[in-house]
Amino acid sequence: MIFASDNWAGAHPTIAENLVRHAAGFASAYGTSELDRAVERTFCDVFEREVAVFFVSTGTAANALSMTAVARPGGVFFAHRDTHMAVSECGAVEHLSGGGRLAPIDGALGRFTPQALQAEIDRYPAAFVHSGQPAAVSITQATEVGTVYGADDIAAIARTAERNGLPRHMDGARFANALVSLDLTPAEMTWKRGVDVVSFGGTKNGCWCAEAIVFMNPDAARDFPFIRKRAAQLFSKSRFVAAQFEAYFRDDLWLETARHANAMAARLAAHAEASPHARLAWRPQANEVFPLVRRDVVEKLEEAGAIFKRWHTPPAELAGQTQENEVLLRLVTSFATTPEAVDSFGALLA
Amino acid sequence: MIFASDNWAGAHPTIAENLVRHAAGFASAYGTSELDRAVERTFCDVFEREVAVFFVSTGTAANALSMTAVARPGGVFFAHRDTHMAVSECGAVEHLSGGGRLAPIDGALGRFTPQALQAEIDRYPAAFVHSGQPAAVSITQATEVGTVYGADDIAAIARTAERNGLPRHMDGARFANALVSLDLTPAEMTWKRGVDVVSFGGTKNGCWCAEAIVFMNPDAARDFPFIRKRAAQLFSKSRFVAAQFEAYFRDDLWLETARHANAMAARLAAHAEASPHARLAWRPQANEVFPLVRRDVVEKLEEAGAIFKRWHTPPAELAGQTQENEVLLRLVTSFATTPEAVDSFGALLA
Amino acid sequence: MIFASDNWAGAHPTIAENLVRHAAGFASAYGTSELDRAVERTFCDVFEREVAVFFVSTGTAANALSMTAVARPGGVFFAHRDTHMAVSECGAVEHLSGGGRLAPIDGALGRFTPQALQAEIDRYPAAFVHSGQPAAVSITQATEVGTVYGADDIAAIARTAERNGLPRHMDGARFANALVSLDLTPAEMTWKRGVDVVSFGGTKNGCWCAEAIVFMNPDAARDFPFIRKRAAQLFSKSRFVAAQFEAYFRDDLWLETARHANAMAARLAAHAEASPHARLAWRPQANEVFPLVRRDVVEKLEEAGAIFKRWHTPPAELAGQTQENEVLLRLVTSFATTPEAVDSFGALLA
Amino acid sequence: MIFASDNWAGAHPTIAENLVRHAAGFASAYGTSELDRAVERTFCDVFEREVAVFFVSTGTAANALSMTAVARPGGVFFAHRDTHMAVSECGAVEHLSGGGRLAPIDGALGRFTPQALQAEIDRYPAAFVHSGQPAAVSITQATEVGTVYGADDIAAIARTAERNGLPRHMDGARFANALVSLDLTPAEMTWKRGVDVVSFGGTKNGCWCAEAIVFMNPDAARDFPFIRKRAAQLFSKSRFVAAQFEAYFRDDLWLETARHANAMAARLAAHAEASPHARLAWRPQANEVFPLVRRDVVEKLEEAGAIFKRWHTPPAELAGQTQENEVLLRLVTSFATTPEAVDSFGALLA
């Protein structure tokens, strides 16, 4: 009954085995091996266009260096107030981008609207040196609270950004979970809706350590090899990441693991809805479930060994909607979550 | 016949298997798992004292963040002119430390002397704000040219640094190779000789991706968790690095792989000495061999598929010592180098 | 009728003359001259203790380098949401401190409470690496909206900060205006209430370019000479700043100019209160007045050549309090504001 | 007999008076006043083309922000080993440019050749991510040792830089001294010879604090307002710098003060040559004289109150050229140096 986070899981056996398969033999280092090149081609296939792909070691690196790639002096990055970059990355984007800033945008359920984006951009009048200048827009897909932006939402935000001359970034630490939730192709969820750069996460969805930055326009990545290297993010044995991605994409394993995780989340949600002691704070759309659970039941769950987070920072939209004896929980599922664990949890909840 | 670099090798089978062994199951993330804790204890055992250990993704990260940990405003890091930080890390230390600078020290065979260090330090008078202030001393062990500092050399440099109030860092990307070359314990090669912080590399010696920063004094690392996190170097599934190190240290595998690599280098050196077409530029002390080889023989080697580097930046001390038809080569061996490959190379050299 | 900003004024004649008086002759550079030393002593007298004083070129520099001096890795600076650092300095503090972040605190009339501060600090649990770590607290005195913190307010905030182990900074771009408003001594408004570092501004109060960072505890400034120099803020002919401060403090000129500016603001406020077409949005406590004025009257004022700002970002507390045909204005007075200008403005307002 | 540095002088009376003249009245802040605009036009006239001009507070800021404006990720700036940026600015360029590095080029008498430049550039092969990438070339005019680059020297270096795709910067802290020494126009010494950006110094030549960055191509400065502001270098009362430059350029005062300083240097040099106890280390071409003086005479000079520097870091080219009882001195002259002081010094030297 471990629902603490999707990064508590290990590695999918297929991915682990592929890594071992590539353990033997020699290959050129620093991302120049045949395997690296082959996986780069796979990324192009996956996204149905020429893309530039760069492996990095963490999702935080993917986000911070994506923003660095589009940074401007005095630059401001527009993102949701509760996005990972803003609350969970210890200032990495500010540090690595040389002092870029995040402008927090409010919005219900982890998402913001084009209108809210435009209102925030308007606080930075062009060439008004005192406030700084807009540099980029970032959305998180799936969001930190387990919701997703619809295809039209993405397109609308991207159009607003584009009208303001701003590149569009997607934090896709849970890219696959959002993708299968929406039943879109990677192309449809990104560049066909105006997204320029993606933090493409594999770690939470069955890899050990496989994060990539994908530039939809390779020309925009000309300086990026230097940005990555000076940030100490160029693996020497880069092919150990490539090997993970090779297995990840083969036979659509990544979609299968994401579908499984989402299904487990839905199953958890069903248990919560069925329980007289719990209710959903909002409907899950990916692999995170946020139920409000009666305090004594929460304690019982913990005593029984279930692991999850008491969510200490409920979104503003819950204000006044919760009762005193309710606790907001975050439950995260992954490729490794079993129906048995979910149902055991459900039984305790009932 | 691949002698391009020790990072062209894959992973040692024992290490790969251990990684797979830990693929299943759940564990807490971000370096807090039992396996992480156990490996931290192993590091304490290896170094025979309480140390603070932090995994990072690359040797460049280990170096740059080690220096960041000891940086001062306007700070200057003293290191050999040809050290990895200075010539092969794209300015990572300057970038990540917020503008720290490297003061290059000359010295034969990749090493500098305490006298040369003091002379360079003297260029930064205390409280003379214009030149900046000394911040730390770094030595590379083994060096970039396959030599090592003896225990007394390390102690003498450390004493000089200490007299000037400066912390001592060791870039140990090839720590194990130096260690077995000198037949010292880790304690003897580091803190017993005055070293404070070590970039402890496992990747070149049989791991896929296993680099650690080891602080001999844990109190000096109080802020380091934040330094690492804001640099985007905190792995979520940190235990996949821990698993590598677990196997690395078990039954002294790491010493065995290093001894093998060094032995292969010695065997290569013997071939070079025996050849009428080659001679050693200097005696190898770890796992890198630098022979001067007749140009036509070099071409023959390349045609035969041998992979190595023509060393484009011969150290100053070779000036006037080489003949026109000689090429300086760099040959690197590793756990994966076979005697057969070495002897095939030797045969072509003869 | 120029009420655009206190930095639209030139220099007070006494200050200008003193600068000329020191134009001739030679003096040692980079802050080491006799005049520099004498003015440093004056600062000690003014603050009634040994302080360390550093001149810098702008108020932005004073703020950004003050925070840099107390920065920590992953560090967070707590300040009011609308403070100058946050909205008018183009990210200087983030840039110069190496990626430090501002945590915005809400609060009416440009001030925040100890409770609001504690609530924000609580979002950064100790040693929780993901969110970063608290580094310092900054208050602005007088605030951006012309109010001041009372002596007890300052002490209460400082106590809260101290309980959390955080140094206390005061952005004193309008230090003198607040001081005379409260009728306190510099010591009473700063270190006797727990303030550690002050951005001490002279420019807005009659100097051309005279900003200083004052450390109440000189030991805390040991590295600061290097912080200033590497930020390119060490004047070679430093004494031209010293000369301004010499005249500024002599015969309490600085208090006189501040009192004049505040009196002019009060006179403006009286006109606004007396007018049937205007009302005060809140009571001015220093040299800034924020009236709500009927739109047609605003246009008349502008046509008559009056210069002021339409304040585009009214504080949240005004929401729902204004009428559609009202415009919020910001009027700033200075040593150079004449009663005639104020009364002409008042006549138009009436 | 003060020859310590040209920044020991105060301000030229004409410049001081002009500052006072502009003390009264109001003007818009942050570089937008009529006077600011007028002085910008004067710069265009002086350089005979449309230029973009930005005032900053120090020569260090001018250099560091010039390089920041042309920086690239992993970028390397090529400059003489002994240039001010490298040895006297506390790492400001590395800090403010986000980790850019200086690649030191050797060369006699403070100058380097196009050949030496190309050899250094060749150490950074295109797209070789490990070493970083070339970003810009900087020359110092006049140099740190009182010599100047001839017009053809500048053009040759600029051509080499241009062939390598690198922008050209001139550190003109002593721009005027070089200009009158060569009898060139500003255009001839800069853009007509391929220079793109100039650190234009007024402080050492009679101003108090007047430094500017001049972009020969205003399009290249599009982001520069933000670069300056986030570096805390935008003066609010910017016109006080403008006022200095207004007087500086009027009636060619700047050329007059530079000619005077150079003439005083020549006069000092003549004394040194005439003395049996001294000789010139090399011929002065601007306002700095480097004589080798017999040790006992140096002591006599110091006892008599003369102020100068014993030059502790003699250029490499002097090695073996000096005798044991000789001391290398640096004597700097300025607009404020009198013939009487020079002749008194000369008399003691004789």
Image: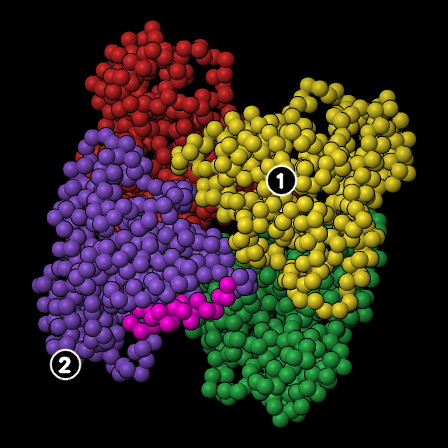
Chain colours: A purple, B red, C green, D yellow
Mark 2 closeness class: few <14, some 14–19, many ≥20 residues within 10 Å: few
Residue at image point 65% right, 57% down: C56
Q: Which residue is mark 1?
A: D191
Q: Which residues are magenta?
A: A104-126
The amino acid at mark 1 is: Trp
Q: Secondary structure at mark 2?
A: loop
Using the image, determine if residue B4 lies above or below residue A151.
above
Across and down, in percent, residue A161 comes to 38, 63
Query: Could you tell me how far apart the alpha carbons at marks 1 and 2 are, in whole angstroms?
Result: 80 Å
**In the figure, is residue C248 to the left or right of C60?**
right
Front position in the image: A269 or C89: C89
Res C188 quadrant in image: bottom right
Count of numbered marks: 2
Local crowd size for mark 1, using a 10 Å CA cut-off: few (<14), some (14–19), many (≥20): many
In the image, A75: left or right of D152?
Answer: left
**Residue A107 colored in magenta in the image:** yes
Instruction: Give the residue at x 71% y 52%.
Output: D42
User: Residue at position x 32%, y 23% from top?
Assistant: B308
**Amino acid residing under circle 2:** Pro
Question: Which one is nearer the viewer's eye here, C176 or D112?
Answer: D112
Tag 1 and tag 2 share a subunit: no
Left or right: residue A214 versus residue A10 is right
Pointer 1 with pointer 2, Cβ within 8 A:
no
Secondary element at tag 1? helix
Q: Residue B270 sits in which quadrant?
A: top left
Residue A276: which numbered mark, if any? 2
Q: Position of residue A87 (x, y in %)?
A: 37, 63
